[in-house]
Image (cartoon, helix red, strand yellow):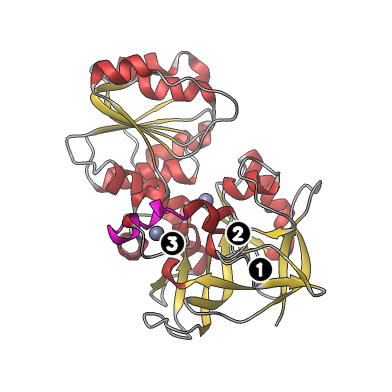
Amino acid sequence: MRITAAVSRDGEAAPRLEQVDLSGPRAGELLVRIVAVGICHTDLRVHAGGGVGTPRPVVLGHEGAGIVEAVGEGVTHIRPGDHVVLSGSSCGHCPSCLANFPTYCREVMPRSFGGQRMDGTSALSQGGAKLHGHFFGQSSFATYAIADARGAVPIGKDVPFDVAAPMGCGILTGAGSVFYSFAMRPNHTLVVFGTGPVGLAAVMAAKLVGARRIIAVDPIAGRRALAEELGATDTIDPAAGDVAEAVLALLPEGVDFSLNTTAVPAVFDAAVKVLGMMGTAGFVTAPPGPWTTMLQPLLAGGRSIRGIINGSAVPQIAIPMMLDHWRQGNFPVDRLVRRYPFADIADAFHDCHNGTAIKPVLHMENA
Ligand SMILES: [Zn+2]
Ligand SMILES: [Zn+2]
């Protein structure tokens, strides 16, 4: 079928809408009409050619939400007409998948960033030539996507798609870090570095679990104010001085958990310095360039530093749970969303990059 997709090519500031061809779902896949899709910094980084070697031209987008149009062979838990959030792709049979940690699937890198199915094919083409896709098992910067059914989460039809879409990655990452990676409890303390969608989701989640102290660090005053509205007990402007010292002035014993949602190298140091005994520093993105881990405090304090992918969550459990809290007004993720017509993807990329939009969400209607 002929669809409209945003294609990432070398040397262009943002993906451009083009007419491309999409073949039907194979075994284990869904054809989804995308209604809304969030933009995540991973999209910006990969579009810019950063890091992970995704081949081009390619269709990105990994926070898709929409309506299932058709299902491939063997898909039994999802039917045409279902509303779904798309998260990542996983194999279903490696030890991580079998242990219900699909975000740590042993094939997570090629399935997320390889630009094609594991057998080397792509559902996308243009003028008869292969177009790379299957980004996080979805490539949802498009009016339709072929999605890995294992990453699809059915949702209630009452949920607006722009609320649902960012649940697939950004919101899942922040909230899952608190709920699952850290398993935070009411006696715990948390400092969040960076209050974009990931950081603010962590703040909301920490409030939900009743965390004793929630400190949010961000240079933007408006974001600090929003963090306070959403549950932060304290905020810190990193421009005001040494961030680690400011955290320790609030909690001299150190924090139980730090969550670094930034790629700023100096923040990795601060995120370890603020830890109390047996504290854990979680991070969700890697800094550019070399960074030396502070091995001595990790060793001496029995501390750990932990990489976290999508909050270590089982999306099919976490997303319906977050949506229930959203329905009850206790997880107001809609406050992070700014809507853009699909055709304005370049503006959305720009606003995402410079931070004027916390969670840009594209709308595909009439694309
Ligand atoms: Zn993402
Ligand atoms: Zn697996």
Could you say which disc has been placed on residue 142 in the image?
A: 1
Q: Amino acid at mark 1?
A: Ala
Between 359 and 32, the one nearer to me in the picture: 32
Between 275 and 322, the one nearer to me in the picture: 275
- If the picture is divided into quarters, which one holds ligand 2? bottom left
* Pointer 2 or 3: first along the chain: 2
Q: Amino acid at mark 2?
A: Gly
Disc 3 residue: CB within 8 Å of ligand 2: yes
Q: What residue is at 56 percent from the left and 50 percent from the top?
A: 40
Q: Residues within 10 Å of mark 1 (few under 14, many from 20)?
A: many
Corner quadrant of residue 98 = bottom left
Location of residue 13 in the rendering, given as x and y in whole percent from the top left corner: 77, 47
Circle 3 sits on which residue? 90
Q: Is-magenta flag for residue 208?
A: no
Task: Report if the CB atoms under discs 3 and 1 are less than 8 Å apart.
Answer: no
Task: Report if the CB atoms under discs 2 and 1 are less than 8 Å apart.
Answer: yes
Say which quadrant the C terminus sits in: bottom right
Residue 237 shows in the view: no
Residue 313 shows in the view: yes
Q: CA distance from mark 3 to mark 1?
A: 21 Å
Q: Taking 79 as reference, is 286 above or below it?
A: above
Corner quadrant of residue 203 = top left
Q: Amino acid at mark 3?
A: Ser
